[in-house]
Image (cartoon, grey):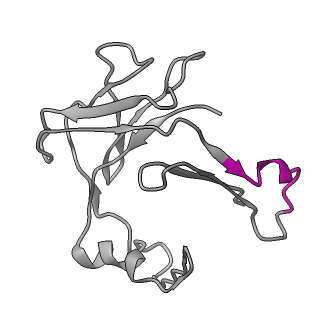
């Protein structure tokens, strides 16, 4: 596994933003069904990604002066990301922050989060092969789900 930090700052209409939250729920799962024209925009996707300028990244095992790389996505806007150098990783229990003095579309911000001290993976050892004719297996990686969650899904 490789650590990575990344994402985008997205612009939505209120209706686009609300679609996933309006889906029926069954326990902790939501079922979302949408219809849209082939080649059309997915109704709940962002209209654009916003420019936040240079985003600084600080925390344990992160070299001083590190910034998130900014990759332009055609027609959408920038995507920001960082991957630690080989042999380095984010530290469980470490507090990490991202900050910017702002860009052309986003004002200044400075936020931080502390990673959980441990992660539990369920179902990982049960995946020995993937039969593409069946439903995709799902493996969850969970810590404090309000701060960090990730999933590995086999997709065709």
Left or right: where does residue 26 sit relative to residue 59?
right
Residue 19 horizontal/vertical position (percent): 37, 79
Span of residues in magenta: 121-131
- Identify which residue is drawn at 46% across, 82% down: 37
The quadrant in which the C terminus is found is: bottom right
- Identify which residue is drawn at 83% across, 48% down: 125
Q: Nearer the viewer, residue 121 or 153?
A: 121
Left or right: where does residue 35 sit relative to residue 110?
right
Q: Is residue 124 magenta?
A: yes
The quadrant in which the N terminus is found is: top right
- Identify which residue is drawn at 35% across, 39% down: 113
To which quarter of the image does residue 135 belong?
Answer: bottom right
Residue 73 horizontal/vertical position (percent): 37, 46
Rendered position, 17 above or below 10: below
To which quarter of the image does residue 58 belong?
Answer: top left
Rendered position, 97 above or below 59: below
- Identify which residue is drawn at 48% across, 51% down: 144
Q: Is residue 105 magenta?
A: no
Left or right: where does residue 76 sit relative to residue 87?
left
Residue 28 horizontal/vertical position (percent): 55, 73
Q: Nearer the viewer, residue 13 or 37?
A: 13
Rendered position, 113 above or below 50: above
């Amino acid at each position: 596994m490789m650590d990575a930090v990344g994402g985008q700052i997205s612009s939505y209409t209120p209706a686009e933003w609300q679609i996933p939250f309006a889906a029926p729920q069954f326990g902790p799962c939501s079922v979302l069904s949408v219809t849209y024209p082939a080649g059309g925009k997915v109704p709940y996707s962002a209209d654009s990604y916003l420019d936040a300028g240079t985003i600084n990244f600080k925390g344990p095992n992160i070299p001083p002066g590190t910034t998130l790389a900014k990759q332009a996505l055609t027609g959408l806007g920038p995507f920001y990301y960082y991957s630690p150098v080989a042999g380095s990783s984010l530290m469980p229990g470490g507090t990490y922050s991202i900050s910017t003095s702002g860009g052309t579309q986003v004002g200044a911000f400075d936020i931080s989060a502390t990673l959980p001290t441990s992660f539990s993976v369920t179902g990982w050892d049960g995946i020995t092969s993937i039969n593409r004719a069946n439903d995709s297996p799902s493996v969850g990686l969970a810590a404090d789900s309000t701060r960090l969650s990730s999933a590995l899904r086999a997709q065709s």
